[in-house]
């Protein structure tokens, strides 16, 4: 996937994500506190991409939507 930095450990604290496995790991970590509808879609999309070795772009897009729903910033996506 296109690499990104996710503001998940508090304001201004980012973690780098480069693979679908890292997307899934971050979603399932205890650091993800908001479990809305977009979270569940991102998790299922990431797991499906891992199992089928496809749809990495879709998994990344769903992850970004879930992060935004949770109030997290994604770089470089959220840069002006």
Image (spheres, helix red, strand yellow):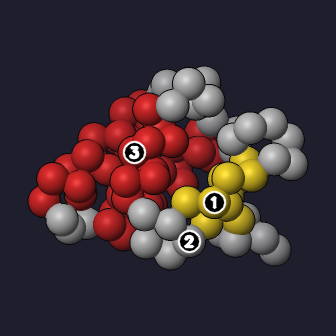
User: To which quarter of the image does residue 39 belong?
Assistant: top left
Local secondary structure at mark 1: strand
22 left or right of 9?
left
Q: Residue at x 35, y 40 (%)?
A: 43
Measured from the top left, where is residue 62 in percent x and y?
42, 53
Does residue 34 appear in the picture of this structure?
no
Local secondary structure at mark 2: loop
Crowd rating for badge 3 (residues with CA inside 10 Å; few <14, some 14–19, many 20+): many
Which image quarter holds the N terminus? Answer: bottom left
Q: Which mark is residue 3?
A: 2
Crowd rating for badge 1 (residues with CA inside 10 Å; few <14, some 14–19, many 20+): some
* Label pair 1/2, CB-CB below 8 angstroms: yes
Local secondary structure at mark 3: helix
Residue placed most toward the observer, 14 or 79: 14
Q: Which residue is mark 1?
A: 16
Measured from the top left, where is residue 37 in percent x and y?
42, 31
Whole-number angstrom distance, CA of label 2 to CA of label 3: 14 Å
Whole-number angstrom distance, CA of label 1 to CA of label 3: 13 Å
Q: Residue at x 15, y 53 (%)?
A: 51
Which callout, 2 or 3, points at the residue further toward the start of the chain? Answer: 2
76 left or right of 25?
right
Does residue 66 appear in the picture of this structure?
yes
Examine the rendered structure and indicate whether residue 30 appears above or below residue 7.
Answer: above
Residue placed most toward the observer, 38 or 32: 32
């Amino acid at each position: 996937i296109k690499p990104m930095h996710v503001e998940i450990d508090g304001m201004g604290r980012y973690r780098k994500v480069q693979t679908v496995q890292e997307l899934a790991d971050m979603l399932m970590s205890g650091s993800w506190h908001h479990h809305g509808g977009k979270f569940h879609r991102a998790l299922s999309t990431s797991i499906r991409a891992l199992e089928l070795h496809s749809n990495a772009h879709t998994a990344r897009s769903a992850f970004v939507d879930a992060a935004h729903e949770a109030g997290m910033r994604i770089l470089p996506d959220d840069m002006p």
